[in-house]
Image (spheres, rainbow, N blue to C red):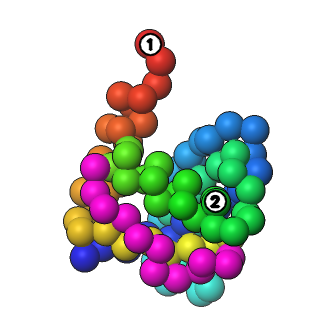
Amino acid sequence: MGQITIHVVPGARSPALEFIPPPATGRSGLANAPLLKVRLPERAEKGAANAALVRWLTDLSGFSVQIARGHTSHRKTVVFVATQDEFLSAVRSGLAKSRPR
């Protein structure tokens, strides 16, 4: 089971996803730096943004996604049944397929 740290920005005008390169090794304080920054139009009220995050990442990647930590925080850890590389590759492919041509 893989996991990834995500920084979520609820209440955005439109959904967006930004890939953030992993930090260089040996730099203190960056071990849990987000690898994805996700903007969602849903507000952070009554779990709406969390539900939208899980739904969108599941749709993009094709993997089942769950929030493991950070249910009430902008910084979340999500888990999935894949390696981190497989998950990120699937999300990239899903984004490419969902963009209008």
Residue 38, percent across and down? 60, 53
Q: Does the magenta stretch include residue 18?
A: no
- Frontmost of labels 2 and 1 is 2
Reading the image, the residue beneath label 2 is: 49
Residues at marks 2 and 1, CA–CA distance in whole angstroms? 28 Å
Point out which mark residue 64 bears: none
The residue lying at 56 percent from left, 47 percent from top is 18
Most distant residue in the bottom direction: 28
Reading the image, the residue beneath label 1 is: 101
Q: Give the range drawn in magenta.
A: 62-73
The three-letter code of the residue at mark 2 reads Ala
Q: In this view, does 73 lie to the left or right of 19?
A: right
Element carrying mark 2 = helix
The three-letter code of the residue at mark 1 reads Arg
Q: Tag 1 or tag 2, which sits nearer the N-term?
A: 2
Residue 66, percent across and down? 41, 71
Element carrying mark 1 = loop
The residue lying at 69 percent from left, 45 percent from top is 41
Camera-side residue: 39 or 50?
50
